[in-house]
Image (tube, helix red, strand yellow):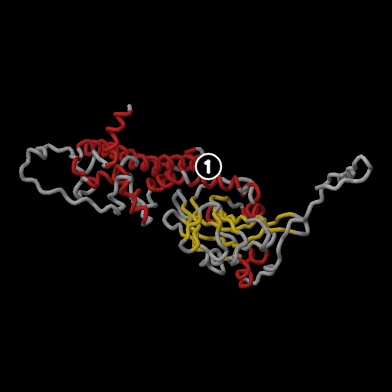
Amino acid sequence: MRPLLWALRPAVRRNIQPFEDSFIRTFSKGASACDSPNLEPAAASAPDHDAILSSTSHKNGPTSAKRTAPVGSKRRRAAIRTSQDLPFEQLPYQCFQEARKILRADREEKLKQIGIERERIALLKAKDASKCGGEAEKTRRLRSMETYLEELKILADINDPMIKKRFEDGDGDMSKPIYRYLANKQWRSYRRPLLMQRITQMNVTPDIIPRMNPTADVRLAFGRRNVQPGDFVDSRVSEQPGKLRVQVFDKGERRISVAVIDPDVPDLATDRFGYRCHYLAVNIPVSPTSPAVPLSRPSETSQMVMPWLPPYVQKGMPYHRLAVFVLEHPSHHELDASSLKETSRRDGFNLRSFVDKHHLRPIGVGLFRSQWDEGTASIMSRAGIKGAEVEYVRPRVESLKPKPFPRPAKRNRMGFPTKRL
């Protein structure tokens, strides 16, 4: 084995790449490169920092250094590098084009089924409810048929390479079912399990609400910083309200409420922790195509209940958890913001009672943490919050063990106590 390893080492040092662009030849019916005397020189390869064309690991170094993520899959970028600026759907690969013919035939079949299902839905809507077994039975059948119609729309486009290319490039239209399906699948593959892990480990459930089943992707940002679930955010960064992005994956517009709760407020009188509401807004419209929710610009009369209160932690206290809850209203029901202003207060705000009273459904949550830092005192003074000079210390607990008896002094043979060296 040792002579073989010595023979392979020079090849590793030279970084031999057997699959360089100049050695790749696409499927074609023409003559090979050695049979064609008059060939134009190959096009210059794309620069290493190109996020669309970089395909190997060592060429992604400058791209990652500039914080520009590669676009699309590695296989797709390698195919585009060798296609001489041809459109993606016209790549000169025989297997690729033959597969596209099969996919087009399958899509035409699905489109015919979609047309038939739409005709069935139109006939059922025009039929009298008494002939369908009642209004409830008619509604149930319509809901089932519409669900099947949405599944057919997804199946018609799920295998289209152009659909996947647009989704990977970030150009997907969220008004179409196929892009909502792909976005939901991508979110559930990583971001949702990460979110569930953080809210479970940090006991957001059941400390604030008993249970949580997120169905919307909630992303929080303060300025240019995107906050991951459970991140520590400096008090100077979170002084101003951030930007919220609530991406839902089912069609239609709905009304939501946004509440920011701190469940780690100390209560010295009862020696317990309480709740504080740092933000509350209601009747905010969101849809798959308009997910942006700016926390600083809700309507003062119909939406704003409690404006943004900067998160703060007094000196000596452990970190505080700040949970951003997105609550969906039932069937476009709007809450009365003016009456909520009169009945709601920040300290002691109970989100469980608020959800049960107004029949809201938690669909998303964001989480970040705050702790005492060098800017907390100035932020508390600017916000008019008292207690910046207070420092919490843990009380000293006396030991329950009995005090040991003093050891008798050692004596020598003459009876005199001996000195310890």
- Give the residue type that dot 1 points to: Ala
Image coords of residue 73 (percent x, y) = 33, 44
Whether residue 309 sits left or right of residue 404 in the image: it is: left
The quadrant holding residue 26 is top left
Q: Residues within 10 Å of mark 1 (few under 14, many from 20)?
A: few
Q: Is residue 155 left or right of residue 35?
A: right
Quickly name the residue at label 1: 136
**Quadrant occupied by the N terminus:** top left
Residue sitting farthest toward the top:
1
Q: Tell me where residue 314 appears, x and y as whole percent.
A: 66, 63
| Residue 2 picture quarter | top left
Residue sitting at x 44%, y 50%: 251
Q: Secondary structure at mark 1?
A: helix
Q: Is residue 120 above or below residue 292?
A: above
Estimate the x, y position of residue 171 in percent, counting from the top left: 34, 53
Return the residue nearer the eye: 67 or 197.
67
**Residue at position x 33%, y 41% in the image:** 156
Residue closest to the far right: 415
In front of the other: 295 or 406: 406
Front residue of 212/305: it is: 212
Does any portion of residue 172 appear in the rendered image? no
Q: Residue furthest left?
A: 37
